[in-house]
Amino acid sequence: MAHAPQIRIPATYMRGGTSKGVFFKLTDLPQAAQAPGPARDALLLRVIGSPDPYGKQIDGMGAATSSTSKTVILSKSTRPGHDVDYLFGQVSIDQAFVDWSGNCGNLSAAVGPFAVANGLVDAERVPRDGVAVVRIWQANIGKTIVAHVPMTAGEVQETGDFELDGVTFPAAEVRIEFLDPAEDGDEGGAMFPTGNLVDEFDVPGVGAFKATFINAGIPTIFLQAEALGYTGTELQDDINGDAAALARFETIRAHGAVRMGLIESVDQAAGRQHTPKVAFVAAPADYTASSGKRIAAGDVDLLVRALSMGKLHHAMMGTASVAIATAAAVPGTLVNLAAGGGERDGVRFGHPSGTLRVGAQARQVDGTWTVTKAIMSRSARVLMEGWVRVPG
C-alpha cells in the first residue's frame, strides 16, 4: 500500500508574551488552506497535533496548554494605513476545532517582529536603528494594533533586559497599543453589552453573582473572587485539579456568552471555546507566585485570575489584560472597585505568575463609556524557523 509523503510548509515557531505559536505567511500555505474553511482548519489541527484524546499533543507543535496551542497567519495588508493583516487561530487540544472568534494579545507582540523580519513591512518604514512602528489589522475582531518593534543594525532586536512575569528569561521590550479596543460594532454590541457596569447574573445550577460584562480586547466576564469561594491568590493547581470547579466555570461562561449576545443558547458554547473569558477579581493580598516569587499586597492594585480554554491561565492573556485595563479605567465596574475605585488610567494587577502593569484611556461621551487605547508591554522572540512537516 502506497503512503503519501509529508509536505513541508515554511513556518516560524515564536514566543509572544506568555504564549507560543506557529506563524505562517498566508502565501506559504498550501493553496487549499489559503482561504478560510475545512482545509485550513484540518491543516492547522494537524500542525499542532489535535485532536488528541491523550491531551498531550505529542504528535504536533502544541504543548498541551491553551497558551501553546496557537497558530497565526500573516499577510501584507491591503487595508489603508496598515502594514500587515493578522489572523489568529486558537486550536482545541482534545477536539477537532479551531476557534477564530478572538485575538491573542500575547502573540500580538510577535506579529510586528515577524512582519518586519519577513518583509511584510515596507523597507522605507523600517529604521536601521531605533523603533519600527508596525500597524497591524487584527482580522479576527476588526481592530487596529500598533506594535513598537526595537531595531538594531537593521535587524529586529530580540535580546534585552525587559522582564515579564511568566517568562523565565529577559528579552527586548515590545510596546503594544490596542486602538479603540471596545468601540461600538464589536460582536455582542457596545463595550458594556448589557448596558450596565455591574449586573446581577443568575447562573442555573451554580448561583447568583454580581458580574461586569465587557467587550474590550476580548469579551470577558468579571466576577468577584469571594462570591466564588476564592481569595484571588489561587495558582493553577488550586483550580485546574478540581473538575467540579472547572465545570462550574464552563457553565458560567456559557450562560455569560448568552447574556453578552455572543451566542443564542448555551448549547452553542462548545463551538466557541476561546470567547468569552471568565475572570475573577479581589483586593490586594500577599501571595507566592508560581515561580516562588513573593508578591506583597502593596505591589499591586488588585488581584485577577482568568480562565482560558477551560483552565486557569498560568499568567494572564494579553487580550484579557486589555479588558482589565479598560474595566479598571471605568469607575464602578467590579475591576475598578477591586482596585479601590475612582478614576485611573493604569493598574498593576497580580496574576499566578507575578504582576503586570496595563493602562487604558477611557472617557464618557453622552453617557456612554468608550476607550480610545489600551497599552501594555510584552516581549517576543523566534524560537525556531524553517519548515513544519505535515502528513500529506
Image (spheres, rainbow, N blue to C red):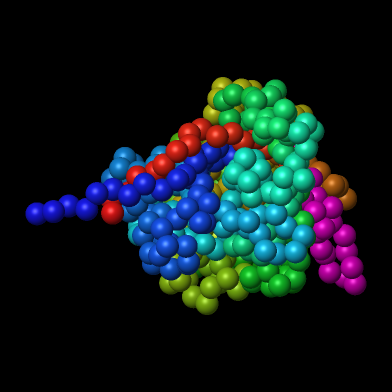
* As drawn, 179 above or below 148: below
Residue furthest out toward the left: 1
Residue furthest out toward the right: 366
Is residue 186 in the magenta section?
A: no
> In this rendering, would 138 be left or right of 311?
right
Q: Name the residue: 82% across, 63% down.
A: 370
Q: Residue 162 location, x and y as percent?
A: 70, 27
> In this rendering, would 125 be left or right of 237?
right
Judging depth in this view, the residue of 321 and 9 nearest the camera is: 9
* As drawn, 157 above or below 325: above
Q: Which residues are magenta?
A: 350-374
Q: Residue 263 location, x and y as percent?
A: 53, 73
Q: Could one spot residue 215 in this view of the protein? A: no
Q: Residue 27 location, x and y as percent?
A: 51, 56
Q: Name the residue: 66% across, 59% down.
A: 77
Quadrant location of the N terminus in the rendered image? bottom left
Q: Could one spot residue 201 in this view of the protein? A: yes
Residue furthest out toward the bottom: 264
Q: Name the residue: 54% across, 29% down.
A: 290
* As drawn, 303 above or below 296: below
Is residue 362 in the magenta section?
A: yes
Quadrant location of the C terminus in the rendered image? bottom left
Judging depth in this view, the residue of 182 and 242 nearest the camera is: 182
Judging depth in this view, the residue of 187 and 304 nearest the camera is: 187
Q: Residue 349 location, x and y as percent?
A: 71, 39
Q: How many marks?
A: 0
Judging depth in this view, the residue of 147 and 193 nearest the camera is: 147
Q: Quadrant of residue 101?
A: bottom right
Q: Name the residue: 38% across, 56% down.
A: 43
Q: Main secondary structure of the magenta part?
A: strand
